[in-house]
Image (cartoon, rainbow, N blue to C red):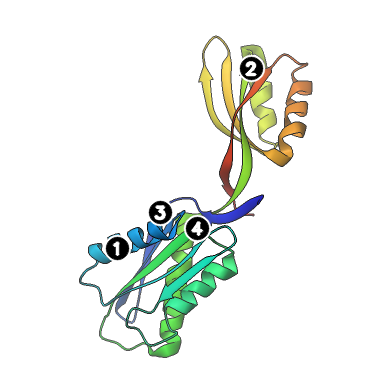
Amino acid sequence: MTSYKTVKQAAQDEFIVNKSRFIGYACPCESEEEALSFLKRIREKHRDATHNCYAYVIGANAGIMRYSDDGEPGGTAGLPMMEVLKNRGVVNCCVVVTRYFGGVLLGAGGLVRAYTKGCAIALDAAQVSVMEKTARVLFDVPYPLWDKFNYALQSLPVILESADFQASVDATLMIRENDLADVCAKLTALTDGKVDYLQTDALFYPWPEA
């Protein structure tokens, strides 16, 4: 497994259509237990809601897929939400769309559109990211080279996680494993070999969706 898509953080967004309030929640979940725990929290928060519909996909290969209409007409809520997750290629994620009925019937087509939108805005709020194998690398940069080094980062496929200004600048970079050798070679050449670096960690890290 080299990469997979999920959401970066738990988040929410909402909208109103024909007086019904829809609140979309998305949360990263590494297991079905985490997804069910998140669902439970949302249900408890919105005990008075008309519906709390959900869809979740667990496993980098989408091994577990579950959804529910929670009392809405069959196929108008959970399944459209699942289709959004599948179309975006998002896994290890649970989405709940809470509805407060506003007194106006939306019809099957209206419900499908509303729950599709609720899922989509929840994913956007939670920021779909690509989890890729990444190295955390600590660079020891002499002060006279810092401006040059920092400027070069803007055109390289890296994320500057932190910069600690001590006797020199300790810059922590996140670099995809596939880019690691090339980036380190370019930064070494740029600074005439005057920067030292050490890989301190290897992990899956969220990169912005292309």
Please provide percent x and percent y for residue 133. 63, 43
Q: Is residue 89 above or below residue 206?
A: below
Q: Earlier in the sequence, mark 4 or mark 1?
A: 1
Q: Nearer the viewer, residue 30 or 42?
A: 30
Q: Which residue is mark 2?
A: 141
At horizontal 60% and vertical 61% (from top left) the residue drawn is 61
Q: Which residue is mark 4?
A: 92
Q: Which residue is mark 1?
A: 40
Please provide percent x and percent y for residue 17. 36, 78
Q: Secondary structure at mark 2?
A: strand
Of the two numbered discs 2 and 1 in the rendering, the one whose residue sits closer to the viewer: 1
Q: Earlier in the sequence, mark 2 or mark 1?
A: 1
Amino acid residing under circle 1: Lys
Q: Secondary structure at mark 1?
A: helix
Q: Secondary structure at mark 3?
A: loop
Q: Nearer the viewer, residue 88 or 56?
A: 56
Other residues around mark 4 within 10 Å, as few (<14) / some (14–19) / many (≥20): many
Q: Earlier in the sequence, mark 3 or mark 4?
A: 3
Alpha carbons under labels 4 and 2: distance apart? 38 Å
Query: Looking at the figure, which quarter contains the C terminus?
Result: bottom right
At horizontal 76% and vertical 16% (from top left) the residue drawn is 193
Q: Which residue is mark 3?
A: 10
Q: Earlier in the sequence, mark 4 or mark 2?
A: 4
